[in-house]
Amino acid sequence: MNSGPFAHLNQEPKLPRVLPESPVEAGTLLPPAFQFSQKTLQDYVDCARRFQLNTTQGIRWPAAESEPIDEVEHFMEQGAQFHLLVQRYLNGVDQELLKPADPLLARWWQHFLENPPPDLPEAKRIPEVMLSMPVGAQRLVARFDLVALDPGERIVIADWKTSRSRPQRQDLAARMQTRIYPFVMVEAGHHLFGGAIKPEQVEMIYWFAEHPTRPERFTYDSRQHQANHTLITGLIDDILGRDPESIWPLTDERRHCRYCVYRSLCERGVKAGRLDSGTDDLDPTLAAGDATLGFDLDDVDEIAF
């Protein structure tokens, strides 16, 4: 049995108390300087109540997303370290200086060196790009693992996934990340591209560390761009129109509750879902940019491991 600082999370807990000092003042809807992201909008799509508890109320509920806790935390750290390795490599650090000692990280790293994402533009490759754009009175932010482009011609967004399973294409297509990233690039990436970007010039590729020869590519076009504009603005308008004092609806898809820290607060279970029980459409290790967990690699710079 785990005897470390998280040992209490492996037990059948009593309903925990809410941690104090919420960053959101009572009666307000969004915290100061808040920007919407693929993670927060995915939260809202998955469960409006989870978005409310996490974002509008700032409640930090002391429960585990997944078990076993030590393994989950180590896996998250490995994912973050892989992103950092790739970033350093793309910034020109010699690969001989980047050999990781961790066996899993070393395997991922070898996969990347031997089978990098294919057919990426070569003129410019910029890792860890963040773009922010206005949506009405709000802002929408996206952080890209890599932007590869031939200025004025073609631009590819590459995203690294260290999930244990490889999601199905239809599940990836439905994710807010697949909708938001190309949308933000078209609207806000002109200074990278050297001029206006047509949706047809944008492509997105997911590269999987555990499945390096099977990336998933998504082309983009004007029809999708308009549909994404309608979806994103509609979701934000829907959020802003809600009463902050009411209890927002809980998801009807209870599978989303398995890895949600608020499940005991919502009386939908007290034990965390198992790390090794994920399915392709709900893998608890899909942590790289996924909103299933309360972890997002947009936050890596603020996390000390």
Image (cartoon, helix red, strand yellow):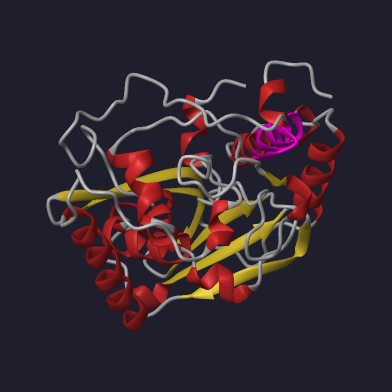
Quadrant placement of the N terminus: top right
Q: In this rendered view, identify the residue nearer to me: 31 or 84.
A: 31
Furthest residue toward bottom:
223
Q: Residue at x 19, y 43 (%)?
A: 245
Q: Which segment is the magenta one?
A: 66-79
Residue 82 visible in the displayed image: yes
Q: Is residue 76 magenta?
A: yes
Counting from the top left corner in percent of width and height, residue 238 is at: 22, 61
Q: Residue at x 73, y 46 (%)?
A: 274
> Does residue 259 appear left or right of residue 97 in this picture?
left
Counting from the top left corner in percent of width and height, residue 10 is at: 72, 30
Q: Residue at x 84, y 28 (%)?
A: 101
Furthest residue toward right:
103
Judge whether 257 appears above or below 24 on screen: below
Q: In this rendered view, identify the residue nearer to me: 297 or 63.
A: 63
Q: In which image quadrant can residue 199 be found?
A: bottom left
Counting from the top left corner in percent of width and height, residue 92 is at: 62, 36
Counting from the top left corner in percent of width and height, residue 151 is at: 40, 61
> Does residue 82 appear left or right of residue 245 in this picture?
right
Furthest residue toward left:
137
